[in-house]
Amino acid sequence: MNKDDIRLNKSKRDAIKLAWRDVVLKQTPTAKDEDLRNACDNFRNLEKSTWDSVIKPTVERFYPQSDMKILKKYSRNSNSGTFAEWDNCFYFKPTFEDRSEVQFRWNYNGQDMTALYYDDIMNLGGNPNLEIEYENKEPNPKFYEQREKLTNILKDNLKVPRYSSYTIDPSTGGCHSRVMMIDSESDWQLLRTYNKSRSAMINAQRDVFKEKNTLINDMNMVIDQSKFLSEVKPYWEDIELCVNFDDQNIGTAISIVSEETKDRLKESAKLRQAHREMLAVVKTPAKELVS
């Protein structure tokens, strides 16, 4: 054992675990992160194209917007006097096959928001995986504190596009429950593809958390079984680049010091080194590249 090796106690272990969690969630890009971004891009593209080519023309065919705006103008703020409302959720049924009506919505719930704005929420200090993380756990004060922070981030910092049309269905709270028929098979297929893209996006976020939570738990087991820092280093080779050990009171003073460091467990060392070498080339001044 190196005489300068750091002996770990509970406070040091807890601090290292927090540092590792932050590194994994915020600084460790994986293929699952890219899958989530691609799923979100696909959802956004389908959201716009499906609205423009199917939803908007279908709704306006049943409910001409010029008429709806006149009805809205004379509406009163009560259910009995409300003639037209903004709707962003609709039920459609195909005419060419025996199938029940299906709901298609253009508003975002919490799952949609945390997937679509995953990186933004992380950058703003929120936890987009909060509901997934506590899915099978009893909520505690930390959960409620984080949920309030997440709610404020979603409310105050993110701009959500609005898709909506006037319809005569004032009692549904934004979801037009009266079924509209779809005659085109291609339109129906596009609607179904849009719904599937939403599910794929939500599942992609779950996959990101599942993968990274496994890394977090694996490292926590290593830390719990280690008496000295040297026993952790083989599995977190860059720990000293990510954690400040200069302060001898690291039990309460561990902090992330490198925002650009991309960390992996031991089996990912080669990928990490390749990434650093790439950054070194990018940062080389142009004059040094001239032969």
Image (cartoon, rainbow, N blue to C red):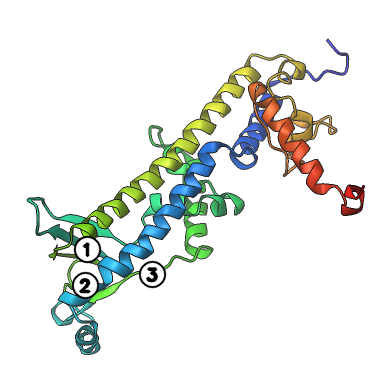
Which residue is at a point 54% across and 37% down the rendered structure image? 31
Q: Is residue 138 above or below residue 281?
A: above
| Residue 79 in sight from this viewpoint | yes
Q: Secondary structure at mark 2?
A: helix
Residue drawn at x 88%, y 51% is 285
Under mark 2, the amino acid is: Val
Q: Secondary structure at mark 1?
A: strand
Residue visible at 74% across and 24% down in the picture: 237
Q: Position of residue 286 (x, y in %)?
A: 87, 53
CB under 8 Å between discs 2 and 3: no
Q: Give the residue number, with chain letter if any, for mark 1.
A: 90
Which residue type does callout 1 highlight? Phe
Q: Are marks 3 and 1 in contact (CB under 8 Å)?
A: no
Label 3: few (<14), some (14–19) or many (≥20) C-alpha neighbours in 10 Å:
few
Q: Please name the residue that numbered disc 2 is placed on.
A: 59
CB contact under 8 Å: marks 1 and 2 = yes
Q: Where does the image place residue 192, in percent across and percent down from the top left?
A: 25, 52
- How far apart marks 1 and 2 lie (CA) works out to 9 Å
**Location of residue 223 in the rendering, given as x and y in whole percent from the top left corner:** 65, 20
The residue most toward the left is 98
The N terminus - image quarter: top right
Residue occupied by mark 3: 162
Q: Is residue 25 above or below residue 265?
A: below
